[in-house]
Each structure stands twice: as structure tokens, then as C-alpha cells.
Amino acid sequence: MSTVIFWFRNDLRLHDQPALQAALTSGATHLLPVVCLPPTQEITPWGFARVGPHRQAFVAAALHGLGARMSALGNPLQVCPAAPAAALPALAQAVGTTQVVCEDIAAPFEQAEVAALRAAGLQVQTVWHSSLLQPADMPWPVAELPAVFTPFRQAVERAGLKPQAPLPAPASLLPPPRVPPDVWQTVGAMPAAAEQGAAATDNPGGRDPRSSFPYGTPACDGGEAAALAHLAQYLARKLPHSYKATRNGLTGLDYSSKFSPWLATGALSPRQVYADLKTFERDHGANDGSYWLWFELLWRDYFRLLHLQYGAALHRARGLSALPLAPHNVQGFERWRQGRTGEPLVDAAMRELTTTGTLSNRLRQLAASYLVYDLHGDWRAGAAWFESQLVDYDVYSNQGNWLYVAGRGTDPRGGRRFNPGKQAHDHDADGSYRRMWGSL
């Protein structure tokens, strides 16, 4: 008997799962599927939890759904509250293997997790599968990635690059190995479907009637089934045709696609989104709106490629720039994250974020700009607060967008400062959003 451990990371799905396919075809006779929970007790340098309650609840729902599907295939997903470096070597020793297969994530914390496993003697095979397009298919090596998004997009489109077709979900899984009960107890493992359900719905913020993504409701459940159902209904209602016109909205489920929460946890594959979108365009026609969904998916890829190009440098205090770093404005930062700056639209945005775990793209940019340019705060503190709060937190996009606003990324044009008064006039002229969140 030989066993391969499959370590789920930000790929909590069975459809379009190249990493899982690699494990299933590795030659092993048994599969041990494991996920290690995010470090909920870890405190950031700025004094708050790295993973807040909204993210915890949404990930729990994704695990509950994935666990139920895997149990139906005869191999339950095991959830470990311990760090991978503690849990996986212990499990590997118990089942007599050194083989681990997992998603490749090109960010410092996630790379360090893999390095720790290899240092412990495990043979870790990482598989890149979070992007729409494969890095190896690009018109240039990753080291020569254009510094600005527009030339990147234009080169991709001129080359006619298309994603590979999504893989179907496996019809069966390898059987699980026997793990001694005391080992399960040592690593704190528990079956996902049995234990994650209550945690998935116990946060009232997910059901706040003002939320633009009420993740505590069936339609916005964190699991793969809800993700695929949302994609299907979004296309069936022909909402791609209006996406470009509505994407700068501030409230409601339909002004944007809302794919990002499921893309962030990996409950939804970007290649599945693209494949279904192309079918939609074939059946109902393409327009600027449906094109703009492709445009946004390319932005998502671009931030991933930047991490492949620069890695940990994107997480330095200065980013890629030589700009001096503003000292951490403790009082200003606290007013900002609590929605007490005195700038009504910014305050409304920050209250929505803290209450519901979601925020429109337009308001994310405004809030980031206000912290960096009006409060002269440390952009890393703002990025960490978004990481803590957002249900659709994605390390690549979050870091990339904060660097973009702060002028510390690759774009030679510098940062992006937003005028709160103009943003309120353009996007909340009647004040309804600000009144909704009690800042007018």
C-alpha cells in the first residue's frame, strides 16, 4: 500500500482540479485529503487577528460543502487546526509516506509553508492552477512581464491566448489509508462535513440585510455547489451584458458578478467561469459587458504573474519603490478601520466592511487611497485589515491593489489618489449608501 497526501489550500473544489488529478494519478493506492485551517489565533503587527470572523465563516462553509462531496465519494476530507508543518509530517509518518501534492501559491507565507514541509523530509509536488492562463503560455518569460497591465492585456489578446478547458470533477477517489485514532487526536483532525456546518452560519454579519454578499444565506453559501449555481444563474439572467455598466455600483448582489468570494477560496475555478462565459456569448452574443468579465479575470492573472516575477519583494515595506515609508499613524488607522474619520463615504465603506466582510471595488480603492494619502498611514496596515475582513481575500489581488494605489508596485505612473467628494458625487449622489451605513 502506498499513500499520497493531498493538501487542500486555496482550491476548495473538485471540479477543474489539476492538483488533485496529479495526486490521483501519482501511482499511489490510497489518498489522504487534508486541509489545515487558516491561523485564526495569529495577530498581525497592527494588533488584530490575521483572519477575522467573516473569513472564518466563509471558509468553514466551503469546507462543509467540500467535505460532504468527498464523503459521498467515500473519502472524507480531514480538517486540521494545526499548522501544516505540524500536522502533515505527523500524518505522513503515521501512514508511511513522504508524498504530498498541493496547489502552488507564489506568496511568501505560503511558500514558507511548503519549505517547512520539505525541510521536514516530505516530498512536496506543487501544481499551479489558480490562474485563468498558464504562466508558461505567456508571450514572454515571467521575468519580462510588462510593468503595466494594458500592454500585458494587449499582448495576451494579440497572441490569441485561451485558457485550457476545465477538468471535470473526479467520479471517484482513491480510498483513504488507515490512520491510528491517537494520531488524529494529536493533530486535532476532524471530518469537514461533520464539524464545519455550524461554524459556517454562526456569524450574523453574513445575514445582514444590507450586505451585498450575504454569505450566511443559501444563495451565497461558501461551498462549490453554491458557487456553480451562482455562476449558472448569473449567466441565465444575462447579467454579463450589463456588467460593465453596473460594475462601479456600491450595493446589491447584481451590480458585480460576485464571483470573487468563491474564486478566492478556490470553490470556483476561473477556467470554469471562462468556459461558461464563452458558451453564454455563443448563445446570447458578446458585448462590452461580457468582454469586461474577461478583462477582470486577466487583471486577476496579472497580479498572480507579478508574484511569480517579484515574490517577497511585493511584501516589503517599500514594495518595489524607493519612496520613503510613512510611519504607522496609530490613531488615524484606528479611526479609519472603525469608520470614524469624519469623511462620510470612507466611514460608510469601513462600517460595511467590518459588518459584512464585503465591499465594492470602487470603495476599496477609495478607502485605501484615504488611508495612504489623507491619513498618511502605512499601506501594509490597510492591506492587513482587508486581509482580516474580506470574505473574498486573495493574497495576489489584495497585495497588488494596495501596491497599485500606494504607488509601490510596477506601474511607473505612481499611486492613485481618489477624491472622496468626487467619488460621493459620482457614485452616491443621493447619499443613500452613506445613510445606509449611518455616516450622513
Image (cartoon, grey):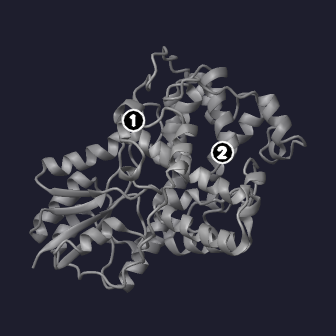
Q: Looking at numbered disc 1 in the image, what kind of residue is underneath it?
A: Glu
- Residue at the spot x=32%, y=84% of the render? 172
The crowding category of the residue bearing disc 2, from other C-alpha atoms within 10 Å (few below 14, some 14 to 19, many at least 20), is: some
Left or right relative to 16: residue 286: right
Q: Position of residue 339 (x, y in %)?
A: 69, 35
Task: Give the label on residue 144, or none.
Answer: 1
**27 and 194: which one is in front?**
27
Look at label 2 and name its amino acid: Asn
Q: Is residue 6 left or right of residue 149?
A: left
At numbered mark 1, what does the secondary structure look like: helix, strand or loop?
helix
Q: How many marks?
A: 2
Reading the image, the residue beneath label 2 is: 361
106 with respect to 251 (left or right)? left
Residue 256 lies in what quarter of the image? bottom right
Determine contact: label 2, label 1, CB under 8 Å.
no
User: Front-most of 125 and 37?
Assistant: 125
Residue 95, relative to residue 439: is it above or below? below
Which residue lies most toward the right here? 430
The answer to whether residue 312 of the structure is visible from this angle is yes
- Mark 1: few/some/many CA within 10 Å (<14, 14-19, 20+): few
| Sooner in the amino-acid sequence: mark 2 or mark 1 | 1
Under tag 2, what secondary structure? helix
Q: Is residue 289 left or right of residue 231?
A: right
